[in-house]
Image: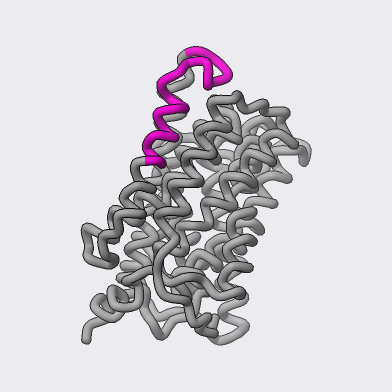
Amino acid sequence: MSDDSRALERAAPAARPSPVTVGMLFVLGVSFALAVSLNRFAADGGVPFLPYVFWQSLGGGAALMLIAAALRRLPRLDFPHVRIFLSTGALNLAFPYMLLAYLAPKVPASLLSLGMALVPVMVYVLALSLRQDRFHMLRFGGILLGLAGILVILVPQASLPAPGMAGWVALGFVPSLSYAVNAVLVARWRPQQTTSLPLAGGLMLSSAGYVLVVMAATGDWWAFGGDFGTGHGATVAAMANNCVSFYLVFEVIRRAGPVIFSTVNYIATLSGMGFGMWFFGDAPSAYIWGAVVLMFVGLFLVTATGRRDGGRAGT
């Protein structure tokens, strides 16, 4: 049986998570939400968004690879590893983070975090199309409710803090699709002999390579110049936050598959809205809270069925 076939077999149908996996999901959800707020702190602190993504990718990736070297867990540079590094580096970090960092000063952090709630719906649709999961009427109803939640946000202008923001909010949902595709590819392409630590390091280093090319093309350089301030601190914090996030991305998908992994966005959405209100004074309207209810009921229906995850151990 090929690696792709084994990955497909593990991922379908989605498992109900074990207590250890649930704990990882909570940590990962808070980490994802914190990343959105750190983007805002960096933007407000004057850090250009391309160098911000570059430094957090390079710093975090280098740190994880040093740990992997100390533990003698460095990955091989064969085709399966290069493929997973390049695909996840683009889909799970470089592209979505550049876009989210660009949008950070234009859209409240709480609204950007709300877009994360679309990921489970997208993952389920992709899993169906790739025969990684089966059709369930409850899950189909959940998809419809999730879409209704998005329409509640975008259609009434009163749901947004300022007129004309709907286009920026819609663009903020594009990273959700990128994350969904990444989750499915990780389940299909992960080299099974390699642990999550070096895979996360390779993801971040490949992302740094992508962003470096864009920086060279645009001439947008920044290297911690000036006095150390809020933007500098946010960049360093993002390096550490990414180390946690991307290790757990690989580990949760390994344990429970992409559909259950995607439910991290329950936690990320609520945490992100909470961080937005706490750090930046965001005040979501009644439309936003109505959308949250619709999306979370939809997400519950999407993820309510499946066998129990056995909580497989390993790193």
Report whether residue 96 is seen.
no
Instruction: Please tell me in which quadrant of the rendered image residue 72 appears.
Output: bottom right
Instruction: Please tell me in which quadrant of the rendered image residue 11 appears.
Output: bottom left
The residue drawn where x is 70% and y is 43% is: 232
Quadrant (top left/top right/bottom left/bottom right) for the N terminus: bottom left
With 235 as the anchor, is 103 left or right in this view?
A: left
The residue drawn where x is 57% and y is 45% is: 269
- Whether residue 3 appears in magenta in the rendering, the answer is no
Q: Nearer the viewer, residue 99 or 220?
A: 99
Q: Residues in magenta?
A: 145-163
Q: Is residue 4 above or below residue 270?
A: below
Q: Which of 134 and 188 is in front in this view?
A: 134
Residue 101 pos. (x, y %): 53, 37
Q: In this view, does 38 lie above or below 13?
A: above
Looking at the rendered structure, the number of numbered marks drawn on it comes to 0
Figure colour scheme: one colour
As drawn, the residue found furthest toward the front would be: 137
Quadrant (top left/top right/bottom left/bottom right) for the C terminus: bottom right
Q: Which of 190 and 30 is in front in this view?
A: 30
Residue 92 pos. (x, y %): 43, 54
Instruction: Please tell me in which quadrant of the rendered image residue 49 appears.
Output: top right
- Whether residue 151 appears in magenta in the rendering, the answer is yes
Residue 281 pos. (x, y %): 72, 28
The residue drawn where x is 67% and y is 30% is: 44
The residue drawn where x is 55% and y is 68% is: 247
